[in-house]
Image: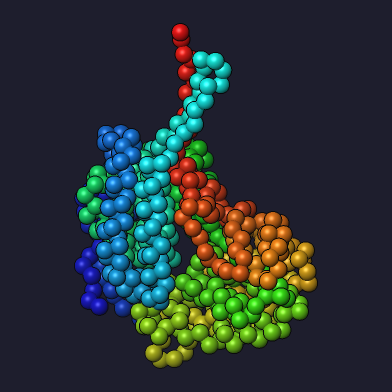
Amino acid sequence: MPSRPAARNLIDGKWVDRNPRDSLAPATGEVLGVFADGGAAEADAAIAAARTAFTTTSWARDRDLRARALLELADRLQARRDEFVTLLARENGKILAEAAFEVDMAVPKLRYAAALALTDTGRSAEVKPDLYSLTVRQPAGVAGVIVPWNAPVVLAVRSFAPALAAGCTVAMKMPAQTALVNGLLYEVIAATESLPPGVLNAFTESGNEGAPLLVSDPRVDVVSYTGSTTVGREIMTAAARTLKPLSLELGGKTPMIVFDDADLDRVVPALTKAVTTFTGQFCMAGSRVLAQRGIADRLRAALVESLGSVRVGPGDDPASEMGPMVDVAAARRVDGIVADAESYATVLVRGGIPTEPELAGGAFFRPSLVEVGDTAASIVQREVFGPVATFEVFDDEADAIARANATEYGLAASVWTTDVDRPLRVGRDLDVGTVWTNTWAVVHDQFEEGGFKQSGLGRLNGARGLEEFQEVKHFVHPVHR
């Protein structure tokens, strides 16, 4: 695959090209292409363009225009699907199947947002004779969107699509780790003829100057951020001065709760994928395996074999079952976490940084499995963000629930059982925003997702995802006869 031309930033319908930087392949360290590295100047210009578009165009009030633009965006993204898949595998490190999965999730989100743009309504009632009340939802204004690198296409769309559907304009910061993928997305946006200039502005940033401006600037009315809990707290602090509404999807430590009656033929492949998908760099990664005592020995042995045999390699190699991490520093960080766990836990699968010459120089890390008894253990409490899972044994439903709830996170959980009543019985007491039954990482655009506790604020997807970018106005209207 030849190197792409320089990836530029898109602000007010114009290309902005300064501060050239190299984008590197995580599998090899080779230079894939050059991108324009944004910062405070790009953020300021993006905010200004979004504010001007919000106040001077018909975008905020024209539902038909919003729906038409979102549908055109979907068509144009679909038309370049294969380019996105190839580039994601090269620059982001995903295996090809995961890259395709990401792009294929993004397109219907745009179509669903287009439907929301047309169908979103308020309420009205005659509350007393000749006295009417009605509520209308109107766009909040300028939305600041901050996107992480682990799934840049779908997570960008997941935030900006409902913002646009609501009638907001957008200033969006994208991650430097996927700069060329970002550039391809900007090309799709720029080619969308029904999208007025300045409505959707985007820049890539390797530093940390532009993103904070999206949070603190009073010209930005609402912020959507996906990323770590630590940064989420910083965003809340920075947003406090202007009392901005926030939509935050933050970290997770998803417990995969396996009961004695579960079907291991289904469980083991699913848990392996939960640990290795996106190389574990995923807020919903199945990073905690909770096994009921009666099945624990069999499950432990099966996972040791399954995780130990995962084929690691470049994302664009069809034979790879797991790609590299985002960069070498991330692989070394995760390796240090597992090494530290050896002092207080039992490492069942060491995994670690490969030594084969063909993988040298890449950001590879083989899956690891660590057995712990104490939920207070560091590796249980922290979000590792890599292909590492803990293995815990529990006795009964009450013990499983207590263990599952024993971290500050509450994004999702998965319950594996053949008892049809157990998932609802157990799930009712799990402090998480999503509970899966005998499956994992299944989400639907029509239904909300989000976190409890330190895993976030607000909801994404569904009607609530649209409402995160709206204000509600109440009209009281007496009728005079």
Q: Nearer the viewer, residue 426 or 182?
A: 426
Residue 152 seen: no
Residue 369 percent location from the top left of the image: 61, 79
When the figure is inspected, residue 27 is found, relative to residue 199, above or below; the finding is: below
Residue 328 drawn above or below residue 433: below
Residue 341 is left or right of residue 27, and the answer is right
Residue 325 on image: x %, y %: 45, 74
Residue drawn 36% across the image and 48% down it: 114
Figure quadrant of the N terminus = bottom left
Can you give x and y, in whole percent of width and height, for residue 251 in the image? Answer: 55, 60
Using the rendered view, name the quadrant where residue 117 is placed.
top left
Q: Which residue is depicted at the point 68% across and 65% down?
A: 420
Residue at 59% x, 58% y is 434
Residue 395 lies left or right of residue 372; in this view the side is right
* Position in image of residue 433 (x %, y %): 60, 55
Q: Count the marks: how many?
A: 0
Q: Nearer the viewer, residue 111 or 418?
A: 418
Q: Relative to 266, does residue 481 appear above or below in the rendering?
A: above
Residue depicted at x 65% and y 67%: 415
Residue 398 visible (yes or no): yes
Toward the viewer: 476 or 202? 476
Quadrant of res 438: bottom right
Left or right, residue 267 beside residue 6: right
Colour approach in the figure: rainbow
